[in-house]
Image: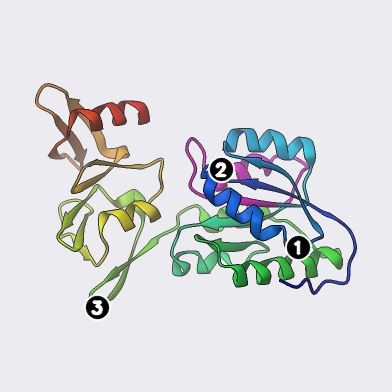
Amino acid sequence: MNETSNGNKQVNCIIVDDEAAAADMLESLLSAFSRLKIVAKISEPQKAITAILQTKPDLVFMDIQMPGMTGFEVLEALNHTAVRPFVIFITAFDRFAIQAIRASAFDFLVKPVDAGELILAIERFMMHFDRKELEVTYTALLEHTGKRKIRFNTTGGFTLVNPEDIVYIQADWNYSEIHLGKDKPEVVTMNLGSLEEILPRNSFARINRSVIINLAYLVKVLRGKRLCILKKDEVSYEFKIPVLRIRYLERLV
């Protein structure tokens, strides 16, 4: 990897990612950039806020989907402070879903991080950093990401769905049905494992081998009958749930 910037100032960086392997891999890739110094690797977003306020890094590499708090929520917390590091998000979201956000002063890397894309992101950052043109506008970014739709591939193209509207998703062989309520479900060419990667981790849970539910519509779990009950617009939905999954839900809600 080559650094194209002519500046000499050291860039202090923090990596925020709850996946240790992903954080280690990113740290290894960043070691090729002599001007970048990793001052901290943090797995918990709440602790990341404190570390950022204390160390005042120039650049933060941050996962979006993390337990307890998303990367956007970390930014929202920083938005009320005087500390505004440049942020490059690390995300499993489809590129189309984040295209609207790329117009801001931020950048994104899609997991697994590609070395070539990382070089471009670092070069883009260095260009602004060395020219002292870096202006971090968290408010603008948060406005773009407040109601973000996700792209799901279909046999004929793709469909855009607000995750808040999804009640549950059910596997159908190599396809999946996205149920938004009373209407006919959207059939997408993605299995549940792939869908788990792009859905907001704190809002959805897989309750058995073939069903993912939106926790916002969960109203009751019956341990004896091993039933999970959702409700939206006065319509109830019941699903079988194993005992281990019941315990999993208890930890989430």
Give the mark nearest the N terminus, 2 or 3: 2
Cβ–Cβ under 8 Å for marks 2 and 3? no
Cβ–Cβ under 8 Å for marks 3 and 1? no
| Quadrant in the rendering for residue 137 | bottom right
- Tell me the quarter of the image containing the C terminus: top left
Q: For marks 3 and 1, give the CA distance.
A: 43 Å
Mark 2 burial class by Cα count in 10 Å: few <14, some 14-19, many 20+: some
In the rendering, which numbered label is found on residue 33? Answer: 1
Disc 3 residue type (three-letter): Gly
In the rendering, which numbered label is found on residue 73? Answer: 2
For label 3, the residue is 156
User: What kind of element bears circle 3?
Assistant: loop
Disc 2 residue type (three-letter): Glu
Residue at left offset 77%, top offset 59%: 135
Residue at left offset 54%, top offset 51%: 22
Region of the chain picked out in magenta, as a range:
60-85
Q: Percent from the top left, x then y, of residue 156?
A: 24, 78
Q: Nearer the viewer, mark 1 or mark 2?
A: 1
In the rendering, which numbered label is found on residue 160? Answer: none
Residue at left offset 79%, top offset 70%: 127
Q: Percent from the top left, x then y, of residue 143?
A: 56, 55
User: What kind of element bears circle 2?
Assistant: helix
Q: Which is more toward the observer, 157 or 219?
A: 157
Q: Percent from the top left, x then y, of residue 15?
A: 65, 47
Residue at left offset 82%, top offset 59%: 35
Mark 1 burial class by Cα count in 10 Å: few <14, some 14-19, many 20+: some
Q: Is residue 127 left or right of residue 93?
A: right
Q: Residue furthest top?
A: 224
Q: Is residue 209 above or below residue 189?
A: above
Give the mark nearest the N terminus, 1 or 2: 1
Q: Residue furthest left?
A: 225
Residue 100 is inside the magenta segment: no
